[in-house]
Image (spheres, rainbow, N blue to C red):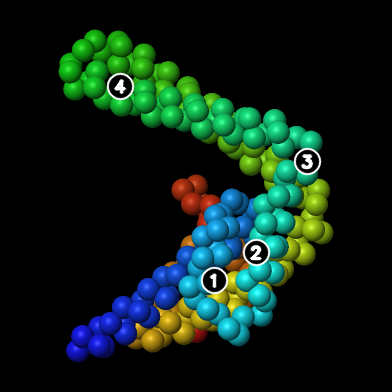
Amino acid sequence: MSASISRRERIRKRAKKIKSLIEMLDDVRAGFYSDLDKIEDLFKELKLKDAPYRPSSVLKSAKAILQLPQKSPEYPRLKKLGRFATYLLFIGLAGLVTATFVLILNLSYYIYLAIITAVLVVINISYFTKVYISQKIVKIYSERENEFEHHGETIKTMIEYLLLKYRDEVRKLGLDPRHVNLKLRHSDYKGLIVKEKPGFFSAKYTLTYSR
C-alpha cells in the first residue's frame, strides 16, 4: 500500500514540475519575465531524454526574448519607471495598513478618509504607469517581430512536447485530461481547447485537453 502511495506521489510531483515548466515557458514566450535558473533546474530534474530540443537551446531562446527590450534606447527609462511604480505600490499598501489602524483605533474619520484618498491616487498612478510600461514593451517586441517569433517558435515546440508529457502523467494518476485546466497566455498549442478567454481579472486563457 505504501509503495503504491509513494509511486502516486512521485507521479504527482513530476506532473506538478512539468506544469510549472509549461507555465514559465509560456510566460517567456509572451515576453514576460520568468526565472531562467528555475527553468534550468526543472529541466535537470525532469531529465527529458526525448525532447525536441536540448534544454540549453530552449534557455538560449528564452534569454534572447527577455533581452530584446534591453536593445531599445527607451529601456533605461522604462526600467526607472518600473521601479517608481513598484515604490508607489508599496507606499499605497503601507497607506492601507495605516488607514486600517486609524479605523480600528477609532481616530478621526477625516484622517482615515484623507489616507484612503491618497492611497487610491497612489495605487492608480502605479497601475497606469505599469500599463504604460507594458504597452511600450509590447511595441519594442513588435519592432523586433521576426527575432521574437523565431525564438518563440522554439519555445512553443517545447511546450507542446511538455503538454503531451503532462497529459501522460495526469492519466497515470487516473484523471481525465479533459477535466484538467491550464492557465496560459497563448491558446495556439496543439491538443488544447479554450474553456475561457482572458477577461478583466485574468490575462490568461483557461485551457484544457481536447482528448
Left or right, 200 with respect to 102, comes to right
Helix, strand or loop status at disc 3: loop
- Going from N to C along the chain, the mark reached first, 3 or 2, is 2
- Going from N to C along the chain, the mark reached first, 4 or 1, is 1
Name the amino acid, label 3. Ser
Total number of numbered discs in the rendering: 4
Helix, strand or loop status at disc 2: helix
Helix, strand or loop status at disc 1: helix
Report the quarter where the N terminus lies. Answer: bottom left
Mark 4 crowd level (few <14, some 14–19, many ≥20, 10 Å Cα): some
Mark 3 crowd level (few <14, some 14–19, many ≥20, 10 Å Cα): some
Question: Which of the two discs, 4 and 2, sits closer to the camera?
Answer: 2
Instruction: Identify the mark at residue 72; answer none if there is no mark.
Output: 3
Residue underneath mark 4: 98
Instruction: Identify the mark at residue 59; answer none if there is no mark.
Output: 2
Question: Which of the two discs, 4 and 1, sits closer to the camera?
Answer: 1
Looking at this view, is 35 or 107 the one in front? Answer: 35
Residue underneath mark 1: 43
Which residue is drawn at the image coordinates 40% and 19% (left, top)?
Answer: 117
- Going from N to C along the chain, the mark reached first, 1 or 2, is 1
| 106 is higher (above) or lower (below) than 62 | above
Is mark 4 in CB contact (under 8 Å) with mark 3? no
Picture quadrant of residue 15: bottom left
Q: Residue 136, position in %: x, y?
A: 70, 39
Left or right, 115 with respect to 185, comes to left
Residue 43 visible in this rendered orientation of the protein: yes
